[in-house]
Image (cartoon, helix red, strand yellow):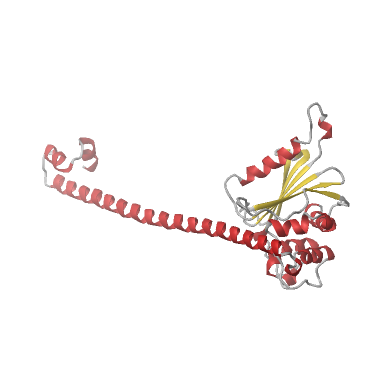
């Protein structure tokens, strides 16, 4: 068996953005957002259900799925495989925008429902923390008093999850392992919880149409090219930086050598009791510099 890489838009939406996979999405969100909490999602509506993506252009390296929970909370699920400057601001902007567009002119603010921005990223974001999942919301920093839970941002950093298959504990571990390794697996483990096993079955290549497989191949190729371009640019930048550093070091060494040699020559002139005017003329020093050497 072969499965699609779930970090692409086609596979991710097949699993989580399909009307027929609501139980799978509920299990995933309960594991990520509501683990060890009394509140659990028991129903939701998927906004903009899955369709085969258009390939032309392929300007984006992210995929998003939107869901509305039974309590009115909106969840924006985004997968981002490449980092870029301003990504954190985009997440906040999208959350705030989805919060604000709920109201029409004249509507009461009490009609606003919470928004959760869930970002699954294939890179490290918060280097000061080893936590795989990070949660942010508005609160008073001094007294740690919550201001509002209406806008919450949750990040899942996949590279920080290093659990081997044999060490997986619980459904949360299984879901994150699925996100990372689905495209490299060749069977559905018996130990997987039913929703995770169902998720794998939805991206089994043997049940894909030719159009879906072609779209997946093109998408993977596009992401690979983007990643390779970034790595090449990074390597070239480092190489250029090293070369410039070496060149700068040589220049500084020459300058320092010249200055040191000039000092020694000047000191010898002073010891020989040459007139100050002669020393200044020969070395280019001014009177203050000469006095300092004396």
**Residue 4 x, y percent position in the rendering:** 70, 65
Q: Is residue 101 visible?
A: yes
Picture residue at 62% right of the left edge, 51% below the top: 60
Q: Is residue 85 left or right of residue 180?
A: left
Quarter of the figure that contains the N terminus: bottom right
Compared with 199, 47 (above or below) is above
- Given residues 114 and 48, the one toward you in this image is 48
**Residue 53 x, y percent position in the rendering:** 69, 54
The mark total stands at 0
Compared with 241, 86 (above or below) is above
Q: Based on the displayed image, in which of its 4 quarters is residue 104 positioned?
A: top right
Q: Based on the displayed image, in which of its 4 quarters is residue 29 positioned?
A: bottom right
Picture residue at 78% right of the left edge, 27% below the top: 105
Q: Is residue 154 left or right of residue 19?
A: left
- Given residues 151 and 60, the one toward you in this image is 60
Compared with 167, 175 (above or below) is above
**Residue 294 x, y percent position in the rendering:** 21, 42
- Residue lying at the far top of the rendered structure: 106
Q: Is residue 131 visible?
A: no
- Given residues 120 and 261, the one toward you in this image is 120
- Residue lying at the far front of the rendered structure: 210
**Residue 88 x, y percent position in the rendering:** 63, 45
Compared with 20, 107 (above or below) is above
Picture residue at 84% right of the left edge, 65% below the top: 194
């Amino acid at each position: 068996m072969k499965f699609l890489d779930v970090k692409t838009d086609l596979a991710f939406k097949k699993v989580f953005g399909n009307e027929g996979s609501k139980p799978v999405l509920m299990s995933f969100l309960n594991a990520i957002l509501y683990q060890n909490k009394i509140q659990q999602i028991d129903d939701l509506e998927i906004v903009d259900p899955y369709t085969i993506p258009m390939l032309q252009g392929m300007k984006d390296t992210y995929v998003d799925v939107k869901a509305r929970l039974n309590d009115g909370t909106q969840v924006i699920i985004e997968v981002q495989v490449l980092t870029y400057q301003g990504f954190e601001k985009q997440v906040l902007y999208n959350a705030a925008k989805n919060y604000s567009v709920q109201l029409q002119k004249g509507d009461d603010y009490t009609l606003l429902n919470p928004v959760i921005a869930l970002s699954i990223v294939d890179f490290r974001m918060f280097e000061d923390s080893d936590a795989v999942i990070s949660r942010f919301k508005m609160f008073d920093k001094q007294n740690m008093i919550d201001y509002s839970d209406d806008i919450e941002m949750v990040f899942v950093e996949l590279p920080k999850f290093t659990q081997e298959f044999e060490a997986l504990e619980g459904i949360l571990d299984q879901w994150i392992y699925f996100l990372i390794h689905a495209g490299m697996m060749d069977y559905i483990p018996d130990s997987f919880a039913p929703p995770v096993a169902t998720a794998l079955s939805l991206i089994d290549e043997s049940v894909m149409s030719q159009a879906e497989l072609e779209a997946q191949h093109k998408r993977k190729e596009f992401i690979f090219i983007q990643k390779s371009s970034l790595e090449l640019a990074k390597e070239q930048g480092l190489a250029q930086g090293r070369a410039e550093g070496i060149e700068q070091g040589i220049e500084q060494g020459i300058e320092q050598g010249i200055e040191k040699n000039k000092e020694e020559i000047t000191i010898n002139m002073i010891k020989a009791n040459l007139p100050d005017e002669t020393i200044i003329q020969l070395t280019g020093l001014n009177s203050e510099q000469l006095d300092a050497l004396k």
